[in-house]
Amino acid sequence: MIPSLSRAAFFACLALAPLASAAPQPLTIEIQADRPGAAIAPTLYGAFFEDINFGADGGLSAELVKNGSFEFTDPIMGWGKIESAGAVGGISIRTNEPRYRNNPTHARIIVRQTGEGFGLRNEGYRGIGVKQGERHRFSADFRLVDGPPRTLRIELVDPKNQVLATAKIDLTSKTWTRLETELIPTATEPKAQLRILTDQPGAFDIEAVSLMPVSTWKIRRNGLRADLVQLLADLKPGFLRFPGGCIVEGRTLPSRYQWKNTIGPVEERKLTINRWNVEFANRGRGAADYFQSFRLGFFEYFELCEDIGAEPLPIINCGMACQYNSGECVPLDELAPYIQDALDLIEFANGPVTSEWGRRRAEMGHAAPFGLKTLGIGNEQWGPLYFERYEKFSAALRARHPEIRLVASAGPGAENEHFKFAWEKIRAMRDRPEIVDEHCYAKPEWFLNNTRRYDDYDRTSPKVFMGEYAARTDTPNTWETALAEAAFMIGMERNADIVTMTAYAPLFAHADAWQWTPNLIWFDNLRVYRTPNYHVQQLFSLNRGDNLLPVKITSASLAENGQPRLYATASYAQQSGEIILKIVNATNLATPATISIPGRSTTPIEARIITLSSADLSAQNSFEAPNTLSPHEQRVPLTSPSFSHTIPAFSFVILRIPAAP
Ligand code: AHR
């Protein structure tokens, strides 16, 4: 369970939920199946990934060694000396005669007396999670400096120093050599440590230390954590936005995300500090050991998109650092290298293998293009400075790549002055972006009060990408937040002619190392669980129809406080031949409804009803109780074009009703 910050604040918030008291009158939901409306974009429900909350290093990247390259600001962070009884020696940090040009720092182990063993230990990311019987590949670069060839002992130990796995490596070469061995733990342990020990005097250098489970997602060598990718894949996202978020911007321009530094051999990807290392240090959520190794880099992001069938949506820095931090801006006449990065990225994704960047992609093992269609220019930028830069990017990209759709930012708020300025500016543009990225983190009431937000949007404007949103309460990821998001999503789906992309944010959080709440998926070194918000996202995504169908809710459809008693949207799914009706009941009263589909045949059929509900708005899932909230499905026979179903209090209900097109 994620820590509760303030129960009092939570219950204050709960009181604002639309509660009804009188016995509910039945209402009628009529679906006009003979009047198919706008197409629903396959990208409507996507996912947002950012390396926040140890989402990449220590998360999606399956690498278990922290600071394996000794490149952190404190090069020995994550490492410790093992000096058993009678041992004398030291560890020095060096950069001369490096193994890797971009990450030159390495460690020298100097042993004068071995005693019962001398060496190094690594603590991993809040420990190293290992599973009994699973193969783990240890590898590192070594160089013998002084003394005879030696055998090193590589071990995994539990917090009491009980050995879980051991293997040997022979160190014979005086030039840098990559050596590897396998470790198979005898027990499962979430907080293991890695030990590298010698029992002979002398000296050797060590660099780029790695420990990876062999069973990564698709068994790739520089692979991803399979259980985390599986949950992402199970969302069936229409697109995957990467690499963020604020991480695109950097606190300063030099620390911005630069995709070219994230491809090629992993050991040569230049490590940088992660902006979330310090961002919330003043709120007690700093993480001094948070860096970006880029083991999960742009090649891996594109490959991941392909694996899970999601359209890639990279966001590129637009020549501005985060406006909440330094706000550094590249002068307009010095923007060319930034624009070139965008052009080269398109070539990296889509170019032929004969092109410079297409060749780099092919060298990494993917000769076929990745099929990039959409590119975001800047993350959460605002004001005239942004649009001056956006227009420069747009002019250059349109000239070379008119086939690429562009996403412009509407800033960090969903209705503030930056937001209004952005939309006015965009509407006035001669060459508008195809899509506008809106962001919204707000209380559940905001989401309930804004289910009609898009009903009045100008239909001639660019399409909307609700690119980051989440309902926030002091206690994160409660049913209350997920239900409010579901009501808001009904409103987005109903307006699928204008809203074509949406993503909850952020996606992942390490329960022992987070900076931001709420998040869609929580994990630790060995476990993972889906939040109620995850179930809502997944239900929308798996139950997306192809075309909207008009829905009319009649009779006494407002609760006592003026809020709708039910929110509903309907669509038709061609492939399965079903009407999909989604209903949210955000009140505390079960509501009987007559669902009518005029003109539907009377042939007996079976409908599927999927329900996600809880009477307890404060309910959460957790590692210990991962299924407190999870959907359940029932099948009901239907014989007439109209039938009754009671929509439970505080519920999200989906009905899939077979119907001829
Ligand atoms: O999702 C977390 C952060 O929220 C993102 O990095 C940023 O774009 C937004 O402010």
Image (tube, grey):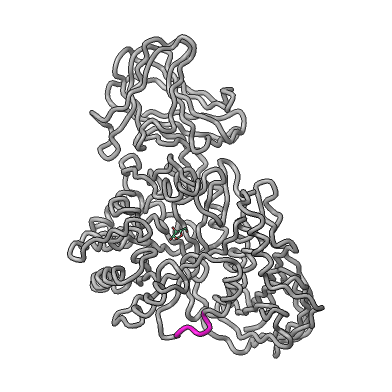
Ligand 1, by image quadrant, is: bottom left
Residue closest to the far left: 333
The quadrant in which residue 11 appears is bottom right
Up the image or down, 615 lies above or below 182; here it is below
Residue closest to the far right: 23
Residue 452 pos. (x, y %): 56, 80
Residue 573 pos. (x, y %): 59, 76
Figure disc tally: 0
Which residue is pictured at 54% across the width and 75% down the height?
A: 492
Specify whether residue 352 is in view.
no
Closer to us: 607 or 431? 431
Specify whether residue 621 is in view.
yes
Left or right, 94 with reference to 42: left
The quadrant in which residue 346 appears is bottom left
Up the image or down, 336 lies above or below 184; here it is below
Left or right, 651 with reference to 146: right
The dominant secondary structure in magenta is: loop
Which residue is pictured at 62% across the width and 79% down the height?
A: 569
- Specify whether residue 342 is painted magenta: no
Residue 340 pos. (x, y %): 23, 61
Which residue is pictured at 70% across the width and 65% down the height?
A: 612
Left or right, 89 with reference to 572: left
Closer to us: 465 or 150? 465
> Where does the magenta region start and end?
454-458
Left or right, 280 with reference to 14: left
Q: Which part of the image, by quadrant, shows the C terminus?
A: bottom right
The quadrant in which residue 377 appears is bottom left
Up the image or down, 289 lies above or below 304; here it is above
